[in-house]
Amino acid sequence: MTTRPTVDTQSWLRCGSCATLLYRKRLRRNLDVCPECGDHQRLDARERIRQLVDPDTFQPLPDEVAQVDPVGFVDSVPYPQRLATARSDTGLAEAVLCGEADIGGYEVVLAVMDFRFLGGSLGSAVGELIIRAAERALARSRPLILVTASGGARMQEGALALMQMAAVSQAIAALREAGVLTISVITDPTYGGVAASFATNTDIVLAESGARMGFAGPRVIRQTIRQPLPEGFQTAEFLLRHGQVDMVVERRSLRARLAPLLSAAYAGRRGPAVPTPDSAQPVLIRDPDRIPERDAWQGVQSARDTDRPTTLDYLFTAFDEFSELHGDRLGGDCPAIVAGLARLGEQHVAVIGHQKGHHTKDLLARNFGMPAPAGYRKAQRVMRLAVRLGLPVVTLIDTPGAYPGIEAEKHGQAAAIADSILTMTGLATPVVAVVTGEGGSGGALALAVADRVLMLQNAVYSVISPEGCAAILWNDPTATPRAARALRVTAPELLRLGVADAVVPEPPTGAHRDPIAAAELLRSALVEALTPLLAVPSDTLVRQRRQRFRRYGASTRPVPIGARS
């Protein structure tokens, strides 16, 4: 990290990362980020707040708390003397500065830690101040933003410091239960008891570029396991790859990245906002006879066309903005599932979808849209966040199926799919699923337990791929087209079966030929399907959703299968 000059009036300093000699005023104009190597200098709490919030909006909360020395701790000097020195050096009462402010015009409560004060350690006074901030956020229904910078729990307070991990976590839990958004912003460094409590148990976790976070520090780990650590270990970028944080953000972009998240939180508390479509003519097709029939195998090939719009394509065309959230918090971030918060007109929604790609490099990077367990667990995490924030869920389905690999099985692929299905049956918010391309088996159903299931006109949806069916039942790969016809995989056939509720028309040349027109049709279809659901009480939604899938039982509803091939 860049080292601060020892004298405030010093005009030049050397970057501790790249050793470049920097003009101090230039560094400050660049928000204390080295313009040569991008190294993010540590900020004190006041400077962090100045950079993060809207100008002249910060109002500090009272910081008077009882001073404690519970164990009479003395190392080279008594603990009270260390506290007095820290207060004198920093001008702060404790290692956290709390207050209320606006970010992007949205009112928030902040708790910003300062590493200069005894390493930002978590003691009973720090815990008390953060809890008070959380209680203020709860009382006023304002999002709570925690900016962490800490070496861990404060050793000088013994077990009382350890208890703060639970005490602050309780306050975070109360906010989550009340549907008040909590966000942590991880800055360098964040370790120990802070990392293992409120830094990571918030709804959304952002990490500043280059920040390090972990339970045990690198030195402790090396001394314990006697092994070299991988390059970039515990950095923000490492944490993103391993599913621990939602996004890594450059300092100059922090405020801009927070604003849409705060907007979604406030929108969810205001209630539904999807307008009635301007056109009186509905987009959705509910009569299968209105859809031109096509050969099932040709339909499968069309649904698999790599030029068809992907989830990310639709997110940047059919929706108005999107903040992607990453990670399952258990060690993975599956690239085959994209998830986050988006806006559809004035209505904020959570969107989750399979992501394939258009070219070989993209397809390989996204595992051809075949999710690993981490993908389904990420999806569930975002679904639950949507419920807490009062936002509807939209899923976009385009996958050959869940990934059938050794690692996927080792990490519980079947259980991840089962949990996703189970989660969706009880989501207390409207859910609309759209099969945009290929809906393959349980890997597709894991995102399709919805109040309304839509299919694009040239999409397919099946219990198994035609190739798999031909191999199992005919033991003949040339029987694949026959299997496709027998499986009844096309949109009009699934509409007749009642599996799909409606079909979204595609442009005459297909979505792959005219993706912009396809996005406009999808947007109109989503508004049409979602609008009536927003007025339905959540308990009724859940009951009706379960009844919807109950009707597929043979004893309750005979399913017409049509003429056999």
Image (tube, rainbow, N blue to C red):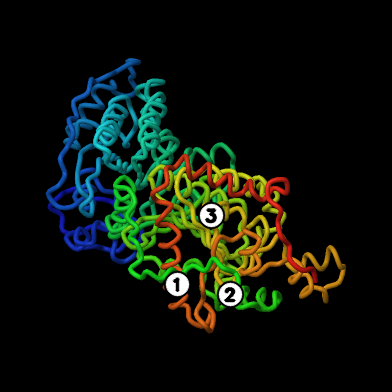
Residue 386 visible within the image: yes
**Amino acid at circle 1:** Leu
Q: What is the crowding at mark 1: few (fewer than 14 residues within 10 Å), some, or many (at least 20)?
A: many
Residue position for label 1: 521
Residue visible at 19% across and 50% down? 50
Mark with earlier residue (3, 1): 3
Name the spot of residue 259 as percent of width and height, x first: 28, 55
Residue visible at 65% across and 75% down? 299
Q: What is the crowding at mark 2: few (fewer than 14 residues within 10 Å), some, or many (at least 20)?
A: some
Badge number at residue 333: 3
Mark with earlier residue (2, 1): 2
**Amino acid at circle 3:** Asp
Give the position of the C terminus as an image quadrant: bottom right
On the picture, is 308 further left or further right than 387?
Answer: right
Q: Quadrant of residue 248?
A: bottom left
Q: Measured along the vertical axis of the image, is residue 69 above or below residue 148?
A: above
Name the spot of residue 180 as percent of width and height, x first: 34, 40
Residue 15 visible within the image: no
Q: Quadrant of residue 340?
A: bottom left
**Amino acid at circle 2:** Ile
The CA span between labels 2 and 3 is 39 Å
Q: What is the crowding at mark 3: few (fewer than 14 residues within 10 Å), some, or many (at least 20)?
A: many
Badge number at residue 291: 2
On the picture, is 191 further left or further right than 303?
Answer: left
